[in-house]
Image (cartoon, grey):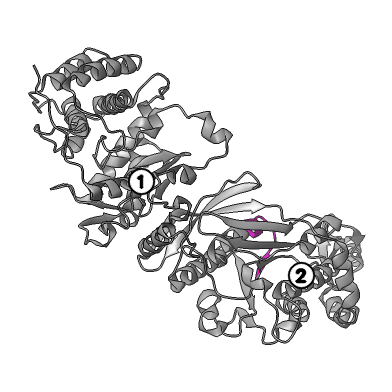
Amino acid sequence: MTATVRPPRFSFKAFLIRHLGSGSIDQEHLLPRVGVSYETVRRRLFYYGRSFWGKELRLASTGYGWSWRYGRRVNWDEGILYLPEWLENQGPVPGQEVYRAAVAHALCHERYGVRYPRKGLDGLTQRLVEVLEDARVEALAIRDCPSLQGFWSRLHTVVPGGWTTGHYLERLARALLDPDYQDGDPWVQEACRQFLMHDVGDTAFIPGLARALARTYRKKRIRFHADSDGLTLTYRDDNRCCWEEEPRAAMHGITKTKVRNRRWRLFGLNLDMIDESDNPSAKQDSLLAALFNFRLNIGVSVEESADDALGVYRYPEWDYKAQVERFSWARVLEKNPPEGDAGLVDDIIAEHKPLISKMRFMLDALQPTESLRQRKLEEGEDVDINAAIQAQCDIRMRVHPDPRIMMRTLRKERDIAVLVLLDLSRSTNESVQGQEQTILGLTQQACVLLADAIGKVGDPFAIHGFCSDSRHNVSYYVFKEFGQAYDRQAKARIAGMRGRLSTRMGAALRHATVHLAQQRKSRRLLIMLTDGEPSDVDVRDRKYLRYDARRAVEDAVRAGIQVYCMTLDSGADRYVSTIFGTRNYLVVDHVARLPEKLPMLYAGLTRKG
């Protein structure tokens, strides 16, 4: 008869950590760490998965998550393998080996794993299904690569003597993997015996065996806690890939981060205000804001629904402190902008008729008027008189004539494409000093005059804009695309411009570079119009977004794109040259002259186009 075992004593601190996460309660993220970071091994893990498993891995970091269960566990999500931001050494096993073990185990699920339905399975049975499925896919991998057994066994250090369900599950996981491990518990021995009786290539036995093991385990009278009783093996994932997806969350539009925020409500704690970003200090401030039910405009980073987006794109970001590029870090949502009254554009043109007349001569000078004649062609449009006379003379002199007596007239055309990228952050709603007009209104006027000028010259052009609300939600608006006519719809979109949120410049520059790189032109120009430096709600280090934008500009230049910035910030000299270079920016001292300056800048930059 098995003796009844007492559960561990209740700890209020452990209760708080379990329900509120360890990010701001025990200051775990401030402790010195012994191990390696994800960014130092990301490249090697990518090649490890490709060479050893033949898999093109899409890797990303989970960041410093709010809780261990949801924030730092390895997991598959939408084809991307998320790994912890930092892994400590596991005894004699260094952190980079733990990363390799995690990638190898995750790829076992990708290669050998199947999904099981949750219906009819209680919490304990589901845990046992996960443990058995982990053992099954690892056994299949060991059958192909026997060295993996010793590789994973080093990370199993549990020994008999615990009294929690989680401890028993870890003992079972080690016994199923390591044949040299001997466990004296009859339940663990019987589970291993029944598991070895089946073929690991068959998946039908897993749910039935899990139910049988759950029935015999309940005779121990040890309570099962769904929140805390699970495997703590660092290299194993959270096993969400073992289960069939439930359609209810997708049907109601619930995103992953919103589900993550559904925690227990304590003392009126407003959980919607808890920060989910990667900034530890922002977590602490947002926790205080949630406790006292007031809102702080810092660090909020929630991945919103992308139902209204035309496309979702992910781009890297440059971390200047670690000198690494964070893979798939920023999410760009390309959207159709709201439309306004197209009559506003006609009013702007009527208001600036004197300026348009003044620019007419400058725009006429940009029109190509020269033509080039190609002579001595065997096939062409016209006869080259000089070559024909020479050929006739050769015939009379009984000399073989030159057959190239044709010519072709080529009209010289401008081979240039222009993309104007607008900063549509909240600061553009501010009024210009000494005037009633806002910066956004002047931006609209400048875009209207620029579109009118480029339309007369005939260059292909596009007008895009952006704003951001953390790295998860960078909204990118297409007011006019390449190849799209500058018609009533484009004018209505320009009239409907709105200033909102923040300025994550690097992600927008990378997306604009992709658009511009598709244009088959010998010269491609990207003009950035902004009223301030890069900033966002989940970043406090000002240099971080500056150097990321600089990295995006360097990538654009390597792709053959010229990037030029026109800024309305009078104090931009301290940072704009760092981003765009010393000769690639213009500070507009008198903001009211922006409608005149932007077309002039276009003419000056494209004069040699």
Q: Quadrant of residue 208?
A: top left
User: Which quadrant is the N terminus positioned in?
Assistant: top left
What x and y, as percent, mark residue 232? 24, 40
Crowd around label 1: few <14 · some 14–19 · many ≥20 (10 Å): some
Q: Is residue 524 visible?
A: no
Q: Quadrant of residue 124?
A: top left
Instruction: Kindly check if marks 2 and 1 are in contact, taking CB atoms under 8 A apart as contact.
Output: no
The structure residue drawn at horizontal position 37% and vertical position 49%, both measured from the top left corner, is 266
> Is 82 on the left-hand or right-hand side of 478?
left
Residue 375 versus residue 229 in the image, above or below: below
**Residue at numbered disc 1:** 47
**Residue at numbered disc 2:** 444
Crowd around label 2: few <14 · some 14–19 · many ≥20 (10 Å): many
Q: Is residue 287 visible?
A: yes
Mark 2 or mark 1: name the one nearer the start of the chain: 1
Residue 325 versus residue 122 in the image, above or below: below
User: Which mark lies nearer to you, 2 or 1?
Assistant: 2
Residue projecting furthest to the top: 197
Which SS class for mark 2? Answer: helix
In three-dimensional space, the C-alpha distance between marks 2 and 1, rounded to whole angstroms, equals: 48 Å
What x and y, as percent, mark residue 209? 28, 15
Which SS class for mark 1? Answer: helix
> Is 409 on the left-hand or right-hand side of 469?
right
Residue 74 versus residue 299 in the image, above or below: above
Tell which of 257 and 533 is nearer to you. 257
What segment carries the magenta color? 515-527
